[in-house]
Image (cartoon, rainbow, N blue to C red):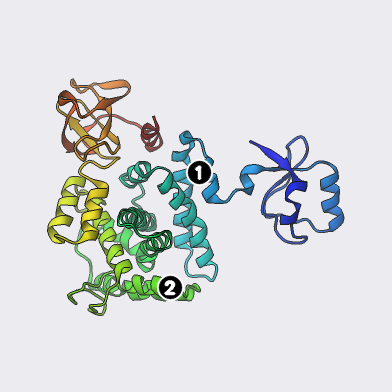
Amino acid sequence: MSFTALSVVKDRIRIGFPLPFGVRNADRTLLLARGQTIGTVQQLEALLERGALVDIEELLTPTELVRRLPREQLPARWNACLSRVSQALQSAPHHGFANAVEDVAAPVVALIERDPDLAIFQMMRKDGNEHTEYGARRSVNSAITAYLVAQRLGWDDLEMAKAFKVALTMNLSMLELQGELARQRTPPTPSQRAALQTHPLRSRSLLEQSGIVDSDWLQAVERHHEHEDGSGYPSGCTEVGDLASLARRADVYTAKLASRAHRDSLAADLAGRQMFMQDPGHPMTAALVKEFGIYPPGCYVRLASGAMGVVVARGPTVTTPVVACLCGPDGRTLAAPLRCDTSQRVHAVQALVGERNINVRITAEKLMALTLR
């Protein structure tokens, strides 16, 4: 930790209001935690006289903090940020929700900017399948997808940020239902189908109840299942808009990658191929397929040598990703993951394989850490 004198940032303290940072003694022991209050001017002066300190990290914005983090701390920060996003989504509706979305979105966007491969890698993780958690994870994955595709399309920062928030909140009214359907082996019931058909309207309503007034955001959420030919729902309108169109494609793509009780997730190459065949020629779909490629980070692959491993980064071409081998050609687990140059014929990627084909037990955090080496 690095510290600075409380006197340097005393102008950021409002007497009687929650502290925006913790206050520590000169020996660095905590005196007042973030959120506690300094009740009087005399109390503040006493702290200044005793040489109170503040942790510099607590003075940084979430974006600045992510930018300064050592790379080895990024996987843990992803886990912390995803947990906060899930909690925020499940707390709607309330009038602090708009600020809550901004607070949780900013560090996730910063993480995407810091390392897009790591962002895609954590998207491909298959954990978090219980009820509301499943829906929240799907929402985050859609938001990451929308942001990356918007970036590839050349959208400006404001448009990319809005694309992220639309995709994050478009299914706000059906988070629990998504989890139920993921666990369900039978077709949706009539009541579930009705909820599916109306969820864009209900999600918009929840946002409005939470104080969201951005008309672009609200309209995109309402129209994220509409099609330009009028075949979509809930109203069959033909004026969809780019934000809604991108959110729908992100939703469809991440749905293909998500496993459910009645079916396994699609392999990334097949998911991309289906997207392209179902929506040929559209620039958003083309950008999505190019961004994720055939072997996106987080996928498991078999190499020409027979070795198997996990893709940890996109490579110079769509067919030559960076792979960390976990099993040798004989099927035995390697003592330590070994990076392979897949541009070499012996290490060329031969096929995507399911995680169950690799008999290696390694935590998601350790897997994510492989992308940083």
As drawn, 339 above or below 111: above
In depth, the one of 117 and 124 nearer the eye is: 117
Quarter of the image for the C terminus: give it.
Answer: top left
Q: What residue is drawn where x is 28% and y is 70%?
A: 196
Q: How many marks?
A: 2
79 and 186: which is toward the camera: 79
Q: Distance between the residues labelled 2 and 1?
A: 33 Å
Q: Which residue is drawn at 71% across and 56% down?
A: 12
Give the class, few, some or many, for how many residues have Cα within 10 Å of label 1's Cα (few <14, many ≥20).
some
Q: Tell me the mark number nearer the camera, choosing from 2 and 1.
A: 1
Q: Is residue 150 above or below residue 328?
A: below
Q: Which amino acid does label 1 sit on?
A: Arg
Q: Position of residue 195 (x, y in %)?
A: 30, 72
SS label for mark 1:
helix
Q: Name the residue tied to disc 2.
A: 206
- Residue shown at 18%/25% (left/top)? 344
Q: Residue 11 vs residue 280: left or right? A: right
Identify which amino acid the numbered label 2 is placed on: Leu
Q: Mark 1 points at which residue?
A: 67
Give the image quarter of residue 168: bottom left
* 182, 232: nearer the viewer: 232
When asked about the image quadrant of residue 170, the answer is bottom left
Image quadrant where one finds the N terminus:
top right
Q: Are marks 2 and 1 in contact (CB under 8 Å)?
A: no
| Vertical side of 85 occupied by 337: above or below | above
User: Is 116 left, or right, of 44 in this rendering?
Assistant: left
- At which x and y percent is residue 198? 30, 75
**Which mark is first along the chain, 1 or 2?**
1
Mark 2 crowdedness (10 Å alpha carbons): few <14, some 14-19, many ≥20: many
Residue 248: x %, y % from top left: 27, 64
Q: What element carries label 2?
A: helix
